[in-house]
Image: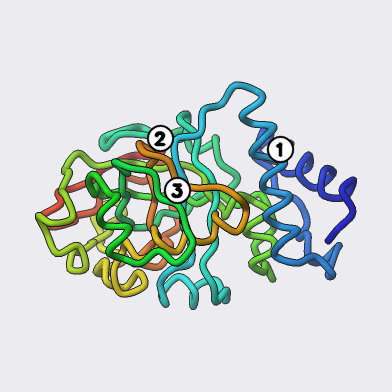
Amino acid sequence: MLPPEVIQQLAAELAEADRTHGVIPRITARHPEAAVEDSYAIQAVWRDQQVAAGRTLVGRKIGLTSKAMQQATGITEPDYGVMFDDTVYESGADIPADHFSNVRIEVELAFVLSAPLEGPDLTLDDALAAIDYAVPALEVLNSHIELEGRTIVDTISDNAAYGAMVLGTTRRRPDEIDLRWVPGVLSRNGEIEETGVAAGVLGHPATGVAWLANKLHLHGARLEAGEIILAGSFTRPMWVSRGDEVRCDYGPMGVIECRFV
């Protein structure tokens, strides 16, 4: 493990980068000995400071759950981060581009839990039983660490590169629709850029919910009823800039639209 003072310093650097919408040098370039455990410790210090400052945690994001995302990042295992209430937008929103250091969009499903979910050894069926409903979502990626050469240690430390989330309005219980075959057709300024289906996320998008609960158990934590779980992208990330209009068609799960201003 990195020394506690180094973990505190890196968490402070990331908090300042978040405040100023800046980017810091790679943690792994400066601390090549840093391990995944260190990165979650850095994230936890940052998270606890945000909560202490008055922000409200509303859920978790799971990242790097599809082959498309793993190939796009060169990272081969899932990760997770936290989501705060002031990062959640509704479809149709104007999103300030200058709130982010850089902006990429991913196509996902989100799940809202009706019951707590605590590992270990949870299965997909356990996750489905604890889910109240699924809703389409776009994730706004936002990296505060230089992108070139990042490893999973850098990404996890940076709250798994989470920036914001845009939620759709169509809700479906897991027994109402085969979630594996929910499509995503992602467009920027009227031009289709990415397509995929939700089965690209670990074979079933809710598999990641069980994975996350099992991971959290290792840290003495669990998922709580009412939490939103952003399950991971089934397309590659799409870069966007100020002025871009984004639209994603999820077929039977409706459409999400937003604009970066």
Q: Which is in the foreground here, disc 2 or disc 3?
A: 2
Label 1: which secondary element? helix
Q: Which mark is residue 88?
A: 2
- In this view, the residue in front, 49 or 10, is 49
Write the residue at 42% across / 77% down.
67
- In this view, the residue in front, 150 or 6, is 6
Q: Is residue 59 left or right of residue 136?
A: right
Crowd rating for badge 1 (residues with CA inside 10 Å; few <14, some 14–19, many 20+): some
Quadrant containing the N terminus is bottom right
Label 3: which secondary element? strand
Kindly check if marks 2 and 3 are in contact, taking CB atoms under 8 A apart as contact: no
Q: Is residue 124 left or right of residue 52?
A: left
Which residue type does callout 2 highlight?
Val
Which residue type does callout 1 highlight?
Ala
| Vertical comparison of 167 with 211: above or below | above
Q: Earlier in the sequence, mark 2 or mark 3?
A: 2
Q: CA distance from mark 2 to mark 3?
A: 10 Å
* Location of mark 3 (residue): 140
Residue 2, how many percent across, how many down? Answer: 86, 58
| Vertical comparison of 138 with 29: above or below | above
Residue 50, how many percent across, how many down? Answer: 64, 31
Q: CA distance from mark 2 to mark 1?
A: 19 Å
Which residue type does callout 3 highlight?
Val
Q: CA distance from mark 3 to mark 1?
A: 18 Å
* Location of mark 1 (residue): 15
Q: Residue placed farthest to the top in the image?
A: 54
In which quarter of the view is residue 206 placed?
bottom left
